[in-house]
Image (tube, helix red, strand yellow):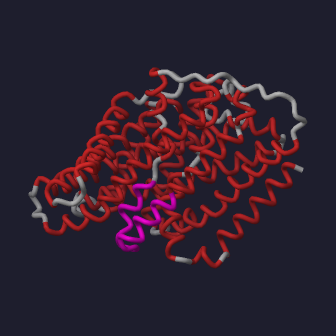
Amino acid sequence: MIVAVAILSAVLVAALLSFGRFARSTDWRATVTPLASIIGSGFLICGPLLAKEFGSAAILAMAALLALAYAVGAVIRFNIVHVENAAPKLSLNDPMAWAMRAAQVMLAIAYAVSVAYYLKLLAEFSLKPIAVSEAYHDLVANGAVTAIIIGLTALTFSGDIRKIEHAAHASVSVKLGIIAGLLAALGLWWVTRTGAPLDVPASKVSWNSIPLLLGLLITVQGFETSRYMGDHYDQATRVRTMRYAQWLSSAIYLAFLALLTPFLAEAQHAEGVAGILDIMELVAPLLGIFVLIGAVSSQLSAAIADSIGSGGLLVEVSRRKLSVRQAFIAAAVLAIAVVWLTDPFSVIALSSRAFALFYAMQAGLALWVSLRTGKGSPATRVGFALVGVICIIAAAAGAPAES
């Protein structure tokens, strides 16, 4: 019955998001892009990792991470209006113009690293049900990821990347449908449980846990994509819909952690970043397949989106001295290097650090523009400085999940 409810919920939500009247609205289309980036498989890997480090306080840790992400989102929303308005008035060699280009370069690098992160997770989820010798696991996973990156890069040469981009955009409805199915399955388990006492681990909160939490910043990242959608949506729409994306994704993350509470003891012992598969099979055996399909599809679509973003930013930053082909090759080479030089746990922290640096640069830009133009209150400027400092700490101290 649990599996049936999960499938029915997934189909209904996916259909509603695909064919409902609001699905064709401007606000929903502008919400989908940041929402798709925020909700990759992050919500799947956070449960086991936070359960190991924080025990039953995992949901509080998740709330703290989401609060940090929302504060960074506030910085980006300020920049959507005020930095964008200031940019056309700057000369090419204005220090602020150079700072803006440096931030774009950092984002292009962060996107390239995140492609490796997404595809590393895709490989881990895909190989979980397959009996691959431990001695060859990394070789097989890294080889598969490298082949996918090369394939995505080759697609950009043919002009077909636009079709792939549209497919990735459309897959958001399916992804959200699968998430709804998982939440419905967990909710039904709560309703039908026999009343036996829950084996919930004790709370574990310490200063030593902060580096791991900061190392998971990548799992709630993606809202910054609204900053670079100016060709399609006005500033007010992008500011408003970024909030919608962060509100909805935060609700999903917290609901998932709350419903996962009865399984936190098992989650503490889940092996690897794909350990959620084992946990969901405790709810219903067939839910493992459900999770696998959702994880693989979401990681692939997110990797496509970020590879497009990385290549596009490199073209823009080079003032089109780099061709589209050269930019995508450069991004692919960086992603492949990250794939072979990191393991699935450390790539999460590396990607988080790259985005934390970008967010710190955005906070610096926000503070600079605020002081230069007089926009924003003194309290707002203190907030920008605080967010910048926290992001610098995250970049310096974000720890691999395996630590």
| Front-most of residues 150 and 107 | 107
Q: Is residue 252 above or below residue 64?
A: below
Chief SS of the magenta region: helix
Residue 81's x, y, as percent?
29, 65
| Front-most of residues 67 and 164 | 67
Residue 266's x, y, as percent?
73, 27
* Left or right of 349 on screen, residue 362: left
Q: Which range of residues does the magenta coloring cover?
A: 223-245
* Left or right of 222 on screen, residue 102: left
Residue at 87% of width from left, 39% of height from top? 193
Residue 53's x, y, as percent?
57, 25
* Left or right of 223 on screen, residue 264: right
* Left or right of 130 on screen, residue 397: left
| Front-most of residues 315 and 67 | 67
- The number of discs equals 0
User: Is-magenta flag for residue 373?
Assistant: no
Residue at 75% of width from left, 49% of height from top? 290
Q: Is residue 56 above or below residue 27?
A: above
Residue at 53% of width from left, 23% of height from top? 205
Residue 77's x, y, as percent?
35, 59
User: Is-magenta flag for residue 239?
Assistant: yes
Q: Quadrant location of residue 336?
A: top left
Q: Is residue 306 above or below residue 279?
A: below
Residue at 63% of width from left, 36% of height from top? 47
